[in-house]
Image (spheres, helix red, strand yellow):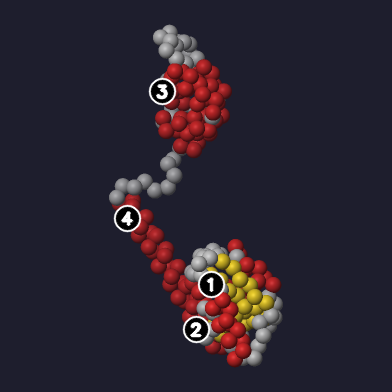
Amino acid sequence: MIAGYLRVSTCKQHLTNQKEEILRYAATRQITVDCWVTEIVSGKKHEKERKLGLLLRRLKPGDTLIVTEISRLSRTLTDIMEIMAKCLRKKIRLYTTKEGYSFDDSINSKVLCFAFGLVAEIERNLISMRTKEALAMRKANGVVLGRRKGSCTKLKILMANSQTILKMLEDQYTILDICRHFNISRETFNKYRRLTPAAAELISRNAAMTSTARRPSAKLPAPETGTPNP
């Protein structure tokens, strides 16, 4: 089977030119394209997330895949190398009409694939180096990298003690009282409030109350998890 693969990134682009070019290429070699696969999708998406991935799975040893440019396969060199390697493993012939690349079982194809692989390896190393340099620069400028430690764990503690917190709010304990009791920050409590509508409702009620009665002075209830302030 001979398949023609056509891809554009947006609806404003047209597939007609690609199809006509592949037809001219096929005519000069006296071959017929048996099926066409077309899609409008960014080349940055991995081939498994595109129709191209399904096409590659359908193609069998001895089949041919034709594209107008190597960039139609992907926009990243590493993905292109993966697709080329898959074609070689399955003994699928890959041709590009504009660049004139031919990837098959010939020595020249294997040398060309090696050259592409070397460039892809250099690209990966450069990306890794730029990422490390950017992170080092941010760290030198005082930016804290990664997730803030402890915030997720303390939020889980609040969720585990939700009934206790709701009871404290019903008894008109303040948010500051609760934060001190569970040894958490106001920011962590605000996350809990957003996740717990009942708590948000009680906080709004307490804020609206105009009573000047003193809140209960009973001993604070012990939490199930966490270390309360003495």
* Circles 4, 1 touching at the beta carbon (< 8 Å): no
Amino acid type of the residue that numbered disc 3 sits on in the rendered structure: Leu
**Dot 3: what SS?**
helix
Q: Can you say whether 212 is above or below 149 in the image?
A: above
Q: Residues within 10 Å of mark 1 (few under 14, many from 20)?
A: some
Q: Position of residue 51 (x, y in %)?
A: 62, 67
Q: Quadrant of residue 46?
A: bottom right
Q: Residue at x 37, y 63 (%)?
A: 130
Which is in the foreground here, disc 3 or disc 2? 2
Q: Residue at x 47, y 76 (%)?
A: 118
Which is in the foreground here, disc 2 or disc 4? 2
* Circles 4, 3 touching at the beta carbon (< 8 Å): no
Disc on the earlier residue, 1 or 3:
1
Q: Tell which of 86 and 93 is nearer to you.
A: 93
On residue 176, the disc is 3
Amino acid type of the residue that numbered disc 2 sits on in the rendered structure: Glu
Q: Residue furthest left?
A: 141
Whether residue 61 can be seen here: no
* Circles 3, 2 touching at the beta carbon (< 8 Å): no
* Circles 1, 3 touching at the beta carbon (< 8 Å): no
User: Where is mark 2, residue-wise?
Assistant: 99
Q: Residue at x 43, y 25 (%)?
A: 179
Q: Residue furthest top?
A: 213
On residue 14, the disc is 1
- How far apart marks 2 and 1 lie (CA) works out to 20 Å
Disc on the earlier residue, 4 or 1:
1
User: Where is mark 4, residue-wise?
Assistant: 137
Which is in the foreground here, disc 4 or disc 1? 1
